[in-house]
Structures are given as structure tokens and as C-alpha cells.
């Protein structure tokens, strides 16, 4: 193990609110290499398509070759070094795990399973080629890269599905290795039942002026208990979640319609146009008008 591990690690920032997904091909011949110790708040998956590398995570070293896949949990300090003189090429996927919400009254959310797996000896972060050779890993990752490059209608939904499928395949492998997630089911079921799939209600009523207090009443919960459960389950406050859903729908209207800002503000349930512009800028760091103009120039 290299002695300089704790001396050199750095936090790698990312705008996960505005860019919850990243997917790209990394070629060590053209990028900054080696990748020094660092950490970040998002999940990172690396699939090696050529070459060999030493990949370190939380002071444990892995030898990774073509066909192998490795997962770095949020907050884990990790690094990548060449194992020999061979060229290293990888498919890389980074994403905000809290955006992957499973809308089911029974299935635990993926972030909860990853948190649980992170503490288990039966959930190794390295998936060797022999273990995943019959799974469409490379196809899923290349689909994510292509969707992010094209950004056609529904690209985020497609990426969401590919990432979810990929994680489910990995979780099932962990289960065969002895990871038991049954204890998560009862907790998840109880919370989901209390919230009555409230995110589906928010999505279908996003054109209305939704209040967190009213949503808590719908779930027969106190405001404080509802707010706590919602944040634990979905990774952000209910108020932020409502705003984000409205802004994402506003973004679609800006991209795919000629509706005015006033019309879009009404369609997305804002009190007026200025409120829509202010909130859009808060989440996207750009005004709706600038965003529409920028996209049309591309």
C-alpha cells in the first residue's frame, strides 16, 4: 500500500443537482493519469475495457483487468494507478444515488441497499469478469454515454433505467455472495406505506401550488415527522423535491415547446413568472430565457 495515501487525497466537487449523471470513455493515454486519491458525494462505476490497473479504495488495493467492474461508494477515498505499461481504457459512470427512487411499497430504495452493502463483507466492490461476463454491462454503460451526448427527449429517463438495472444486477450478485437485505424490507415498507407514494402525487400535480403541510396531512403525519421521513427516503427535503420536479418540467417545456415564460410558469404551478425565473436560476444557475437560447444555438 502506498504511504502517501492520506497526504494527497482531495474532495472532488460536482454539480449533482444540475448534472446528476456523468458517463464517458476514459483513456489514460489522453487524460490525467494516474488518478490521485480523492473522494466525492456520488457513486462511481468503472468498467475496464483495455489494460490493467491498481485501484485503491479506503486503503484496500484491487488489481483490475479488462472485463472487470468496480464500484466506489459515496465518500470513499479512492485512486487509480497503472499496473503495467499497457494502455488503460475504461467506461466511467458517475451518478447521484438519491435520484434513483424506486416507486414501490415493498422494495427498499437503492441508496439504502448501497449504504447497507458498504458495511458488509459480503458486498465486495470488485466484480471480476468471470462474474459478470453474461451481463450486458458494457452495453448499459455505452447507452448512458450515448444518451448524455445526444440528450434527446427522455434521455434522463433512459439513463435512470440503465443505472437502476445495472445496480439491480450488482445487488443480486451480492445476494448470491451472502448479502442479506431482508431486514431493510420491513422498514422500507412501513415508510413507503405512510407516505402513500407521495412523489407520484407530486409529479401528477406539479402544475399546482403544492404545500408540504398539505402533503403531510394527506399521509396522516405531523409536519416534522413527514419532513424527516421524506428526506430519509428521497435524499432531499420535500420542498426542494417539489421545486426540482417543477423546474425539470419547466426545462422540458422550454426545450420542446414555444410557450412563453408566463405560460410555462402557470403550467408548472408557480405563483407568477418572476417566481419561476428565480427558482429556475436557483437550480440551474441560468435564467429560463438564457437556457432556451443556449439550447437552440447548439
Image (cartoon, rainbow, N blue to C red):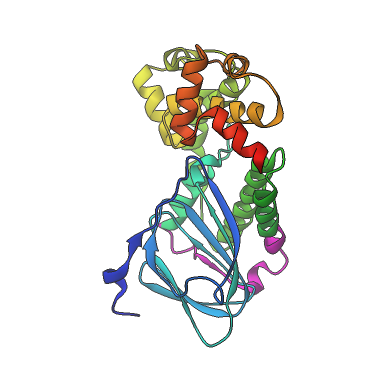
Residue 63 location, x and y as percent?
Answer: 50, 79
Q: In which quarter of the image is residue 34?
A: bottom left
Residue 69 location, x and y as percent?
Answer: 58, 67
**12 left or right of 65 in image:** left
The image quadrant where one finds the N terminus is: bottom left
Residue 179 location, x and y as percent?
Answer: 51, 57
Residue 284 location, x and y as percent?
Answer: 49, 35
- Residue 122 on the magenta span: yes
> Could you say which is closer to the camera, residue 189 or residue 59?
59
> Could you say which is closer to the camera, residue 209 or residue 149?
149
Judged from this view, the residue extending furthest toward the bottom is 85
Q: Which residue is drawn at 49% across and 23% down?
A: 277
Q: What stretch is highlighted in magenta?
A: 119-139
Report whether residue 81 is seen.
yes
- Residue 157 on the magenta span: no
Position of 295 relative to 117 (above/below): above
**131 left or right of 2 in image:** right
Q: Residue at x 48, y 17 (%)?
A: 274
For the image, the number of numbered tags is 0
Amino acid at each position: 500500500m502506498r504511504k502517501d495515501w492520506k497526504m494527497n487525497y482531495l474532495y472532488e466537487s460536482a454539480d449533482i443537482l444540475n448534472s446528476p449523471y456523468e458517463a464517458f470513455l476514459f483513456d489514460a493515454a489522453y487524460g490525467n493519469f494516474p488518478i490521485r486519491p480523492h473522494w466525492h458525494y456520488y457513486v462511481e462505476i468503472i468498467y475496464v475495457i483495455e489494460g490493467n490497473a491498481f485501484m485503491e479504495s479506503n486503503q484496500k488495493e484491487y488489481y483490475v483487468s479488462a472485463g472487470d467492474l468496480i464500484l466506489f461508494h459515496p465518500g470513499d477515498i479512492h485512486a487509480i494507478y497503472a499496473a503495467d505499461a499497457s494502455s488503460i481504457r475504461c467506461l466511467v459512470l458517475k451518478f447521484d444515488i438519491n435520484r434513483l427512487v424506486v416507486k414501490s411499497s415493498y422494495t427498499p430504495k437503492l441508496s439504502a441497499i448501497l449504504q447497507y452493502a458498504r458495511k458488509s463483507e459480503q458486498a465486495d466492490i470488485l466484480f471480476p469478469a468471470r462474474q459478470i461476463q453474461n451481463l450486458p454491462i458494457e452495453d448499459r454503460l455505452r447507452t448512458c454515454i450515448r444518451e448524455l451526448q445526444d440528450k434527446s427527449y427522455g434521455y434522463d429517463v433512459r439513463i435512470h433505467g440503465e443505472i437502476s438495472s445495472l445496480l439491480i444486477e450488482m445487488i443480486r450478485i451480492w445476494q448470491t455472495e451472502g448479502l442479506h437485505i431482508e431486514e431493510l424490507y420491513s422498514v422500507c415498507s412501513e415508510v413507503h406505506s405512510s407516505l402513500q407514494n407521495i412523489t407520484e402525487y407530486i409529479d401528477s400535480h406539479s402544475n399546482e401550488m403544492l404545500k408540504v403541510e398539505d402533503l403531510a396531512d394527506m399521509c396522516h403525519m405531523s409536519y416534522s415527522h413527514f419532513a424527516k421521513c421524506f428526506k430519509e427516503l428521497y435524499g432531499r427535503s420535500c420542498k426542494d423535491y417539489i421545486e426540482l420536479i417543477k423546474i425539470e418540467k419547466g426545462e422540458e417545456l422550454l426545450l420542446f415547446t414555444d410557450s412563453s415564460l408566463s405560460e410555462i410558469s402557470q403550467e408548472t404551478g408557480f405563483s407568477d413568472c418572476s417566481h419561476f425565473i428565480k427558482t429556475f436560476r436557483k437550480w440551474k444557475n441560468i435564467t429560463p430565457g438564457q437556457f432556451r437560447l443556449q439550447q437552440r444555438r447548439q
